[in-house]
Amino acid sequence: MSTIALSLTSSSITTAGSPASITASVTNSADVPARIVLGAFSNANTTGPDPRTWATVERPLREIGPHATESFTITVEAPTGTGAGQYGLRFIAYDADRPPEEYSDQAQTLQVIVESGKGAVAASRTAPWWIYAVAACLVLIVGSVAFFVLRSPQKAPPPGPPPTPSATPSPASSATPSPAPSFTFKFPGSQITNFATINPKNAQIPLTGCKAPYVQRLARPGDTTCVTTQSAQQAQADNQPDVQDSRLLKSNVFTTNACVEPFKWRFAWDTDQICVTPETATRTWFENQGYPEGHA
């Protein structure tokens, strides 16, 4: 008759995504100390996962004195991916110097219950491929619509009432006028690669074709529209790349041919996309209609 007795505090244990524990009591009824092992084993004819590797026994080998009882803590944790269900475990307390099979008739069975969705990390759900395809199509459609909307030409500002010119031009001042400022510029979006120096008072500008005191606007090479000196200077100042850089809509990923409010396209010619103030855009429209009438 065996002198080793084993009992469990429960016949079942439930794992819910974290380790669960029970207590086993092992008694040595012999008159001498014994080296006793508490081991975990699978049930006979077990199929599927082997639960014996799920159990951890605290200090499984101990020397128990005569007629003494030791408590063993058993921790059970189902590995990640274990399906829901019940799994059987057997625990046997046996003499460390003898095979455990000799004590199998005293084995205690523990049912390990793995709950559905517990004890395992849920697999990441990958969205079906068609969801990504639909999303890509929507992005393409929205992008195309925004592209064509932003590419549509801006309308020239509606003309306001033209300023009333004085009947008699003011006589030129007898004082020697200070030289007008010069600007070095390049026309954005054009095929021009050479820089030019514009100075309405300089001999480089062809002043023929306009009645004094009007000069050619030269918003681009060949622009012979007659305007005031101040308007010609403003046109050259507006053409400056650094000026335009501050007025172009940089947040537009489809095109840079849009102006930051309140700036508008100048439309000195049909495809002129220089950003100017609304006042300059309106004045340019009147100049294109022939006002001021400064042609020779």
Image (tube, helix red, strand yellow):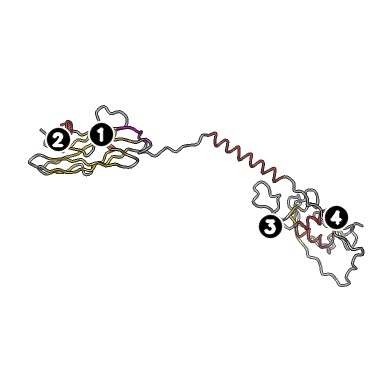
Instruction: Tell me the tag on residue 98.
Output: 2
How far apart are the two marked residues, 2 and 3, measured between alpha carbons?
91 Å
Q: 27 or 65: nearer the eye?
A: 27
Q: Position of residue 97 (x, y in %)?
A: 14, 37
Q: Tell me where residue 112 appears, x and y as whole percent.
A: 29, 35
- Give the residue number, with chain letter if any, for mark 1: 89
Horizontally, is 199 left or right of 29 in the view? right
- Position of the N terminus, as image quadrant, is top left
Residues at marks 4 and 3, CA–CA distance in whole angstroms: 27 Å
Q: In terms of sequence position, does the residue under pointer 4 or pointer 2 come before the other?
A: 2
Q: CA distance from mark 1 to mark 4?
A: 100 Å
Q: Which residue is mark 4?
A: 225
Gap in angstroms between the C-alphas marked 1 and 2 = 21 Å
- Decide which of tag 4 and tag 3 comes sooner along the chain: 4
Label 3 sits on residue: 246
Question: Of label 1 and label 2, which has the lower sequence position?
Answer: 1
Q: Is residue 165 left or right of residue 277?
A: right
Circle 2 SS class: loop
Amino acid type of the residue tagged 2 in the rendering: Arg
- Position of residue 170 relative to residue 113, above or below, is below
Question: Which label lies toward us, 1 or 4?
Answer: 1
Which quarter shows the C terminus? bottom right
